[in-house]
Image: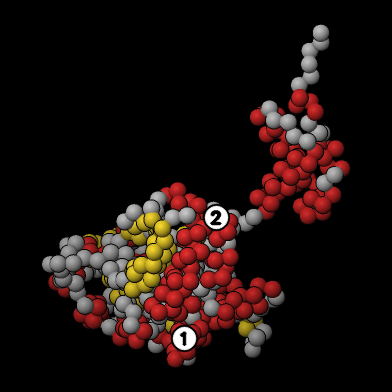
Amino acid sequence: MGKQPSPLAALPSIDRVLQHAGGLIEAHGRDAVKQAIRDVLDDARAARRVLVLDDVLQGASSLLERDRRPSLRRVFNLTGTVLHTNLGRALLPEAALFAMQDAARQPVNLEYDLNDGARGERDDHVEGLLRRLTGAEAATVVNNHAAAVLLALNSLALRREVPVSRGELIEIGGAFRLPEIMARAGCRLREVGTTNRTHLRDYAEALGPKTGIVFKAHASNYSIEGFTAAVPEAELAALCKARGIPFVVDLGSGTLLDMARFSLPQEPTVQQALGNGADLFTFSGDKLLGGPQAGIIAGRAALVEKLRRNPLKRALRVDKVTLAALAAVLQLYLDPDRLRERLPTLRLLTRPLAELRAMGERLRAPLQRALGCEITLVECESQIGSGAAPSERISSIGLAARPGDQKLAARLRALPIPVIGRLQDGALILDLRCLEDEAGFAGQLHSL
């Protein structure tokens, strides 16, 4: 009796499957479909699994759809952190989206002076707005706030000392450490004071012929409480002016408006830094400003010009799409009375609790049916995020799923539009502050 042929020999050939894959080929291209079919057949042989023609086509289709799905995907941010660094920070307003689309799809005068018919400067598209809104003599823009700090340090203090309070030697997300950035910028850090108390005399004793600038960093993601002392910016600026040394302030998130007018935790404003005597200040475009990722530098014209002449400036510059978005956002600030309704960041931070509570009451029962666990409406706390007001919280409303664990969180992340909440005290909290697409959220619950 002869040896029985392996059932795997009955697997259809690649060429045979391709003859029946016309629709897939039209959608994905012949080479991609051929590779997907090969992968399905190889997996079947490795698992000793018999597949018929339709099985192979279905498997190839699934692989192709998986590969086509973009890695960068929309999610529902229900973490309670409005400006969540890992989830993209600020949502852009409609005006910025239109401006980005126009800039991306057609030629623009990015570095072209339409009046003179000669080469122009890309900073010109936002500098006028920044000067008007901040009161600074000049301004420039780079690709993020870390780049702004790097460029300022390298341009103004290369191979020189930079006094910094020990209480401001920050480390923020992604292992960004100020001492290491200063070293990369070619500066020599001169630590002054102690972690909890730094006095004006500490700075005065550190200043000398080797000093390049005095740098003040914003405590963006921590707070020091108790027996503390810090030098007011105005006093430090006066000392620097008397010694002829530039005073540079890192505002962190920074804001162009007093947040108290919206009953929000206060952050240092750009105008305050200028009024306190800063010669140069830096802040982010994609945090409280509510714009695209960018690092904004403004201050004395002579210092800004030094930054522009630095070869690093070209390496750190922003593209036309970012400039278009930033200009559109800055335009909104010219009408502060309507800013809340136009700027998503401000709108989310100031949503009424009654609105959030009503939405939670509508969603509680559908979510409970979908998850099969207890869902309760709870009072919770949101935060601004991205280093702004790190110790302050904003009252919010959320849905609490109990018992909440990593397995439940993973189920929600597996939805067509992943839902990301936070685990707290044995519950999975879905903070509703940033949920504006209620219908989209509810419409996919059946997938659970």
Q: Quadrant of residue 60?
A: top right
| Extreme-right residue of the structure | 19
| Left or right: 167, with 385 as reference point | left
Figure quadrant of the C terminus: bottom right
**Residue 50 point in image, percent of width and height:** 73, 31
Visible residue check, residue 155: no
Mark 1: which amino acid?
Leu
Secondary structure category for the residue under label 2: loop
Q: Nearer the viewer, residue 209 or 240?
A: 240
- Seen in the picture, residue 15 relative to 355 is either above or below; the reply is above
Secondary structure category for the residue under label 1: helix
Label whose residue precedes the other's in the sequence (2 or 1) = 1
| Extreme-left residue of the structure | 227
Q: Quadrant of residue 303?
A: bottom left
Disc tally is: 2
Name the residue located 75 percent from the left edge and 26 percent from the top edge. Answer: 8
**Residue 100 point in image, percent of width and height:** 61, 75
Figure quadrant of the N terminus: top right
Q: Which mark is residue 339?
A: 1
Name the residue located 49 percent from the left edge and 56 percent from the top edge. Answer: 371
**Residue 241 point in image, percent of width and height:** 25, 80
Quote the CA–CA distance across marks 2 and 1: 38 Å
Q: Which mark is residue 448?
A: 2
**Residue 180 point in image, percent of width and height:** 35, 56
Mark 2: which amino acid?
Leu
Q: Nearer the viewer, residue 179 or 440?
A: 440
Question: How many residues crowd mark 1 within 10 Å: few (<14), some (14–19), many (20+)?
Answer: some
Question: How many residues crowd mark 2 within 10 Å: few (<14), some (14–19), many (20+)?
Answer: some
Name the residue located 82 percent from the left edge and 34 percent from the top edge. Answer: 13
Q: Nearer the viewer, residue 353 or 326?
A: 353
Q: Quadrant of residue 220?
A: bottom left
Q: Nearer the viewer, residue 41 or 357?
A: 357
